[in-house]
Image (cartoon, rainbow, N blue to C red):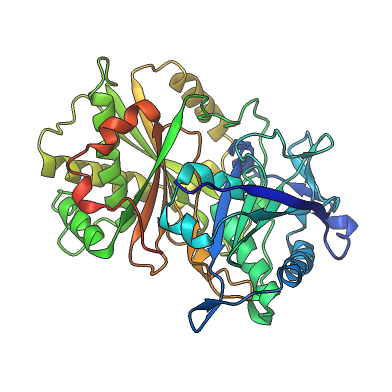
Amino acid sequence: MVMMNVEIISKEIIKPSSPTPSDLRNHKRSFLDQLAPTTYIPIILFYQPKLINGHHVDHDQVQRSSRLKKSLEQTLNRFYPLAGRVKEDHSIDCNDEGVEYYEARVACNLSQVLQHVNVEALNKFLPFEPYGINGAKLGSREVLLAVQYNIFDCGGVAIGVCVSHRIADGASATTFLGAWSATSRGDHVLEAVCPNFDAAKYFSPKDIPWGLGDIGVTKENIVTRRLVFDKSSIVALKEKASSAAGFSQVKFPTRVEAVSAFIWKSLMAISKSKPAPARVHAAVHAVNIRQRMVPPMPTHSFGNLWYFAAAIISPHDELDHDHDSNCTLATKLSKAIKGIDGDYVKKLQSDAIPDSLTKKVGLSSKLGDVESYRFTGWCRFALYETDFGWGEPTWVCCPSMPFKNLVVLTSTRDGDGMEAFVNILAEDAVVFDSDKELLPFVSWTINS
């Protein structure tokens, strides 16, 4: 295991280069923003040092950091709510107070980190702990965005970003990173991308006494397993799941559905191995609703524009045979995800939704025999196109999260494979690691 000493050498506040107009000062959070967790979305992008004739080329890191900060100032002009603060009435005061920017030195080479990935240790490259507000405040006001620029001994860098889930989802964070990097490298076409901040017009805020808060965050010991699926494994998993009654020969499950179902089965095996296994197993998948609305929302609509699709396995579902179980799980997941359609989104926009959600929240707190498994897919996010002017990232990852049975799916750099970051209880890792069906389809490391 690589010993990583990450030392913060500077910290400052970056503000928009131009003041936000007075008519834009009050940004209303949408109903879906209200439901979002009060955690942060953590993303880390790793960039290799430049090589000439096999030797690392020294870069002026001061100049690079200066370019990042200047382009961040300019980008915040368009993404002005990120430089604001959350108000008690579920809105954002776009007061230009700024975002936090850290610079750190890492006492090892980037290659050492990539060759021996320790997912639990990657949080050192983030500006603060992203799963609560401790350490993430300016005075008594919460910051919505923070960045850490990490410099390795070899000249490679890692950019760690924490974006508040109270105002953004993964797609929004990707839009911001794309605009920031375009500004940094001087790409005036993408630099001109302007986000839409009108989600509250589609999903008006509701008077509800609850949200997700930090629900799911556990103080139990969580470990993260990083599974890498190459192209051939994904094809095999899609074929494995495709003979279910719900799939025809010309319409396989998507790669996200097939891989999610495969991991879901392995996680259920953990519960079934316990003295008192859960009777009901629920896979809950986050679904981007921007393109599912009628008409679709703009691609760069900013905010939490996703909802959960839930697939349930109850005692009457027969999962005795290996092949049939994969088919059943994939079919249920696919049906649940497809159910988040235009008509469903219209229901989300109605006034009746808060009552139904309140009932679900109350019910879920009473069900002790239900085991839930949460999935979120980042595979369509253009994170590997985040070029700040020194090339595209070698690796993009989501570090360890303190959520039991949470799975984050990302694309590999070549776009053909997938990575799954599986967060489970440490005591469950023994069963998961010895799953004989899992091992043939995945590798636990990746050549970077």
Left or right: residue 424 compared with residue 80: left
Inspect this view and state whether residue 295 appears.
Answer: no
**Residue 105, visible in the rendered structure:** yes
- At which x and y percent is residue 251? 22, 61
Foreground residue among 171 and 134:
134
- In the visual, does 78 lie left or right of 234? right
Image quarter of residue 105: bottom right
37, above or below 365, in the image: below
Figure quadrant of residue 141: top right
Q: Is residue 131 above or below residue 228?
A: above
Q: Residue 75, how many percent across, how many down?
A: 74, 66
- Say how many tags the image has: 0
Q: In front here: 109 or 87?
A: 109
- Closer to the camera in the image, 374 or 292: 374
Which residue is farthest left? 321
Looking at the image, residue 138 sits to the left or right of residue 323; the answer is: right
Q: Position of residue 119 (x, y in %)?
A: 46, 46
Residue displayed at 53% across by 30% down: 217
* Residue at the extreme bottom of the image, as rendered: 53
Identify which residue is drawn at 22% across, 56% down. Answer: 238
Point 69% across, 80% down: residue:
186
In the rendered image of this protein, does residue 148 appear above or below residue 384?
above
Residue 92: x and y, percent? 77, 45
